[in-house]
Image (tube, helix red, strand yellow):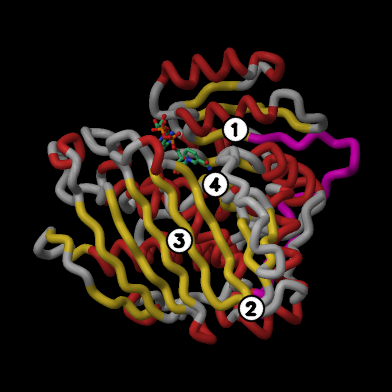
């Protein structure tokens, strides 16, 4: 089972967003399940990620997938076969699935811009919902999920698997315990060799939010976690679409393929981040560093570096980006669906992380002129009616 490393007192002291959510409260799970009852799940969206999540459940005890929905019949058929041990029913319309099946929870793994339209009805049906990250790709749709989650009998979990990865959990618990000293700077990057673009939905900002939203949200989430869910006050960012494949994309708003963003958090803590594609292989990989006044933490590998040991070599190994996925699924099945607990990665943590990505995209791009123009975006400029 997974418990949140941040105490309630910490959370209330440091998070305006979190505090309001805790005060409003969320009611219990849709129905009480005994320790030996099976948790019954349905899927909406079984493309690349949905298929991966389904496979992740195959060997888990106490769970059964009874229904699989996708707009594409061949994906339904293919995944029914993967899950043949449970003989799931197939659906092309998720509302029919919700009407006909007796589910404890639903896993949503549609394209980012299709999250809210599936997640909100699931929560309105009083069911627990695990949805892939980020929450969605506009402020309004993210907020619609938050409102539905607060009103629902079911609970919402968002698929930021690093929150369930023991390496990150241990390192961030130590940071939060204070043994590391005060955090004053955060730094990260995720650099890839391949080219983004073409006609894929990820290249379409209206479906993905762009790469800074669809992909970099993982790292926004980690740094939001380090900062105990305090939202950033400002973001300044620059980006561009440079590679031939990206420039050829047919979409109205095309994803950036390289970007640099700096956030300022309360207390003057800065987070500097770059997200690049089309890089030399030697420059690729993931980096997440926390700088404190006593030592530095490499979050990816969970290593602490102390200025008293200046000759200690840096661990250059790369982490597995998928680590934490099995743990997040286990937590959804047992903590959320079976025991009615609030997810560690929930609508309040997920909202700040998703908004960080949306802030960066807004700061680098003018939608009216369709040009990459750097600006400073304040949290209030996001225009959320939830504050
Ligand atoms: N956590 C991770 O590390 C990770 C990794 C990859 C992708 N993702 C996320 O997973 C999500 C899905 O990405 P993907 O790469 O699998 O996309 P994909 O295009 O492969 O699959 C999306 C599927 O959703 C289906 N779909 C869309 N609307 C639907 C609806 N109304 N009803 C039923 N099915 C519907 C589509 O037909 C498609 O099969 C995205 O949010 C993405 O950001 C997360």
Answer yes or no: is residue 104 visible. yes
The disc, 4 or 2, on the residue closer to the chain's N-terminal end is 4
Residue drawn at x 46%, y 43% as measured from the top left? 285
Mark 4: is the Cβ under 8 angstroms from ligand 1?
yes
Residue drawn at x 57%, y 48% as measured from the top left? 159
| Residue 293, numbered label | 2
Marks 1 and 4 sit apart, C-alpha to C-alpha, by 11 Å
Marks 1 and 2 sit apart, C-alpha to C-alpha, by 40 Å
Camera-nearest residue between 278 and 154: 278
Front tag of 1 and 2? 2
On the picture, is 99 further left or further right than 242?
Answer: right
Circle 3 sits on which residue? 354
The disc, 1 or 3, on the residue closer to the chain's N-terminal end is 1
- Per the picture, the main secondary structure of the magenta-coloured stretch is loop
The disc, 1 or 2, on the residue closer to the chain's N-terminal end is 1
Q: Quadrant of residue 240?
A: bottom left
Ligand 1's quadrant is top left
Does 144 appear above or below 340? below
Marks 3 and 2 sit apart, C-alpha to C-alpha, by 28 Å
Circle 1 sits on which residue? 53
């Amino acid at each position: 089972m997974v418990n949140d490393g941040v105490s309630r007192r910490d959370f209330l002291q440091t998070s305006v967003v979190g505090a309001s959510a805790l005060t409003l409260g969320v009611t219990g799970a849709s129905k009480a399940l005994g320790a030996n009852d099976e948790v019954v799940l349905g899927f909406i969206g079984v493309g690349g990620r949905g298929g991966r999540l389904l496979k992740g459940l195959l060997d888990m005890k106490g769970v059964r997938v009874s229904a699989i929905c996708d707009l594409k019949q061949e994906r339904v058929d293919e995944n029914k076969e993967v899950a043949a041990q449970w003989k799931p029913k197939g659906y092309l319309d998720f509302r029919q699935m919700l009407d006909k099946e007796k589910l404890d929870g639903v896993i949503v793994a549609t394209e980012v811009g299709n999250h809210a339209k599936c997640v909100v009805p699931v929560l309105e049906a009083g069911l627990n919902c695990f949805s892939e990250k980020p929450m969605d790709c506009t402020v309004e749709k993210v907020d619609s999920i938050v409102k539905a989650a607060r009103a629902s009998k079911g609970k919402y979990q968002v698929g930021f698997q690093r929150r369930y990865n023991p390496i990150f959990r241990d390192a961030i618990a130590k940071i939060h315990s204070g043994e590391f000293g005060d955090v004053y700077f955060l730094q990260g990057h995720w650099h890839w060799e391949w080219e983004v673009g073409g006609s894929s939905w990820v290249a379409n900002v209206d479906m993905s939010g762009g790469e800074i939203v669809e992909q970099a949200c993982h790292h926004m989430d980690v740094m939001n976690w380090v900062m105990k869910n305090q939202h950033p006050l400002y973001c300044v960012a620059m980006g561009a679409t440079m590679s031939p494949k990206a420039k050829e994309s047919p979409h109205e708003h095309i994803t950036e393929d390289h970007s640099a963003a700096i956030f300022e958090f309360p207390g003057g803590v800065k987070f500097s981040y770059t997200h690049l594609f089309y890089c030399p292989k030697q420059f690729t990989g993931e980096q997440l560093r926390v700088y404190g006044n006593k030592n530095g933490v490499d979050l990816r590998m969970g290593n602490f570096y102390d200025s008293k040991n200046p000759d200690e070599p840096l661990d250059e190994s790369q982490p597995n980006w998928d680590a934490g996925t099995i743990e997040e699924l286990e937590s959804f099945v047992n903590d959320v669906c079976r025991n009615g607990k609030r997810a560690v990665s929930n609508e309040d943590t997920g909202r700040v992380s998703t908004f960080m990505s949306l802030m960066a995209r807004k700061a680098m791009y003018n939608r009216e002129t369709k040009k990459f123009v750097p600006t400073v975006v304040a949290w209030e400029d996001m225009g959320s009616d939830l504050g």
